Image (cartoon, grey):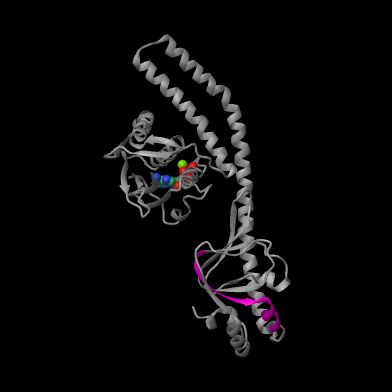
Amino acid sequence: MELINHQFITFFPPEQAQKLCQLAIIETFDHEHLIFKEGEKPDYLYLVLEGKVEFRKAQYYDQFQVVASALPNEFFGEFGVLDGSPRSAQAIVSQQAKLAKISRYHLMEILDNTKSTAILKLFHYIIQRLRITTEEYVKQLAYKDKMVLVGEMVNSIMHDFKSPLSGINLASEMIKELNHDPQTIEWCNLMTIQTQRMTSMTTDLLDFAKGKNVLNKDSFKLKESLEKFIQFNHIYFTDANITVKLDCPFEITIYGDEQKLLRVWQNLATNAVEAFQDHKGEIYITVKKVMTTDLNGCIHLQFSDNGKGISDELLPTIFDPFVTFGKEKGTGLGTAIIKSIIDAHGGKISVSSELNKGTTFDIYLPI
Ligand SMILES: Nc1ncnc2c1ncn2[C@@H]1O[C@H](COP(=O)(O)OP(=O)(O)O)[C@@H](O)[C@H]1O
Ligand SMILES: [Mg+2]
């Protein structure tokens, strides 16, 4: 947009508006360019003409929390410029941005000679932005509280589960000792695997609640892993009257956390199974290789079902934690955990769905 049409400029009478445009310095910044740091002395007010700028506050280690953003026709940095206090967050370009900056000195001079209407407009804008930021802050605070609660809950559940789980493991080992027929051994192994899975699922949840996802990466064969996953769940799928079709025409070695990715497939499968009402369900898992610009290539894994689908209202929030719909005992954490694991692998996940037709999750994973 043109600077003269920017809302900040239009707050002022024509003479001052003209002067502000003359004084403004227009600059273009690339993606990820740091405009100012948290704690820095404020020197400019910035008007966004193109692109997008995000405001991030330092959290712990090298983690940042996005607290707000500014789009064309919006402006930022006014707090520091007006009261001289250090920047309360860092401003970083998240989409190549064209900005007009006005120095604190010039702005104060013009404001000194401006009628109260312009000041009132500015005041109105600032209050509106404050409202939005406060709302976002309260939302994040409530979210954090929930996560702390989940963490405490999982911790105590894990503690209580430990002894019954090791009891089951021990019993299955004993049964194996006493019965050597292949069928019994297979069932006992299944019990061991499933109890191990319960332990790692709770660990996942705990990691997620703490806000970290530490990966234990190693090379593993994807096709073999998916076949193993289907085998683990054979009884679960048969009981639910569901057939699972895997279409992976090649074997490929992936460098990733196999246990965590198994949890992704598991969460996707559980959601799919829960989405079949009373008809016979089908789950399709297809794997394709995709070339990427860095030539390393990636894997496109598609996970589809012909279940009841997801409504348009729910779809955009599906990966948010605590979003659950149509289930008596839903936690709303399954898809959030899926996304955090895929993100930790540097991958991407998206979802598309049609009511009463089915749902497809598209996952792109670096090899
Ligand atoms: N394959 C699917 N088919 C239909 N609805 C789905 C599917 N996957 C997820 N959903 C919807 O998304 C919601 C969130 O899923 P999730 O995060 O796993 O939480 P939960 O399963 O505990 O409710 C579910 O409650 C459900 O309404
Ligand atoms: Mg779920």
Queried whether the magenta region covers residue 103, the answer comes back as: yes
Question: For residue 66, which quarter of the picture?
Answer: bottom right
Left-right relation of 37 to 221: right
In the depicted view, which residue is nearer to us: 266 or 345? 345
Residue 48 percent coordinates (x, y): 54, 73
Q: Can residue 326 be seen here?
A: no
In the depicted view, which residue is nearer to us: 314 or 321? 321
Indicate the quadrant of ligand 1 in the picture. Answer: top left
Residue drawn at (57%, 78%), measured in percent from left and top? 25
Queried whether the magenta region covers residue 111, the answer comes back as: no
Residue 264 against residue 107 in the figure, above or below: above
Residue drawn at (31%, 46%), measured in percent from left and top? 289
Residue 243 percent coordinates (x, y): 30, 36
Residue 104 percent coordinates (x, y): 68, 76
Residue 46 against residue 340 in the figure, above or below: below
Question: Magenta segment, which residues?
Answer: 94-109
Residue drawn at (60%, 86%), measured in percent from left and top? 17
Q: Can residue 90 be seen here?
A: yes
Question: For residue 185, which quarter of the picture?
Answer: top left
Magenta segment, prevailing SS (helix, strand or loop): strand
Residue 157 percent coordinates (x, y): 59, 32
